[in-house]
Amino acid sequence: MAKVLGLGGIFFKANNPEKLAEWYRDYLGFDLSFPTGVSFNLEDLPQRGYQVWGSFKADTEYFLPSNKPFMFNLMVDNLEEIRAELEEKGCEVLAETESSEFGHFGWILDPEGNKVELWQPPAS
């Protein structure tokens, strides 16, 4: 049987795709490969990182304060540093952080109210 090899992309609707892409470029350093998106080089990912596809129950509160039915998770190399940089730029950085055996987590909201989970994988 054929099998899925990993995530091929995340695609979503935006009120202003160009403006939102520019925000991700300016705030998170996305190298826009095409007008409103980025293609990440898998060779740049740490070996301890991985891709996840997961569903949540319809009544989850995990995506709050966003009212969207989805959340982005972006792998970062230094959670505290990127949180400080984003806060300095005026990004809405949520106060809560979390650490577990899965790594370190923090959250932001983009200009369209999408919740973005910033994930620093564990060191080992």
Image (cartoon, rainbow, N blue to C red):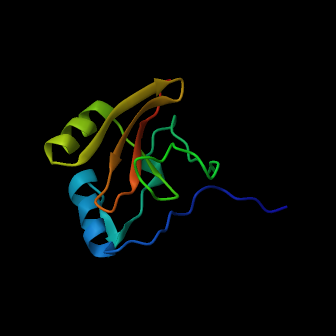
Q: Residue furthest front?
A: 59
Q: Residue at x 43, y 56 (%)?
A: 41
Q: Residue furthest right?
A: 1
Q: Point out residue 49 in the picture as x, y percentages from the top left corner.
A: 51, 39
One can see residue 108 in this view: yes
Question: Relative to residue 112, is residue 67 drawn left or right?
Answer: right
Q: Residue at x 55, y 42 (%)?
A: 50
Front-most of 10 and 123? 10
Q: Point out residue 8 in the picture as x, y percentages from the top left corner.
A: 56, 63
Q: Residue at x 44, y 72 (%)?
A: 13
Q: Quadrant of residue 93?
A: top left
Q: Is residue 93 above or below residue 1?
A: above
The quarter in which the N terminus is drawn is bottom right
Q: Is residue 94 above or below residue 7?
A: above
Q: Point out residue 120 in the picture as x, y percentages from the top left corner.
A: 41, 34
Question: Relative to residue 93, is residue 7 drawn left or right?
Answer: right
Q: Point out residue 5 in the picture as x, y percentages from the top left corner.
A: 66, 56
Front-most of 70 and 81? 70
Q: Residue at x 37, y 41 (%)?
A: 107
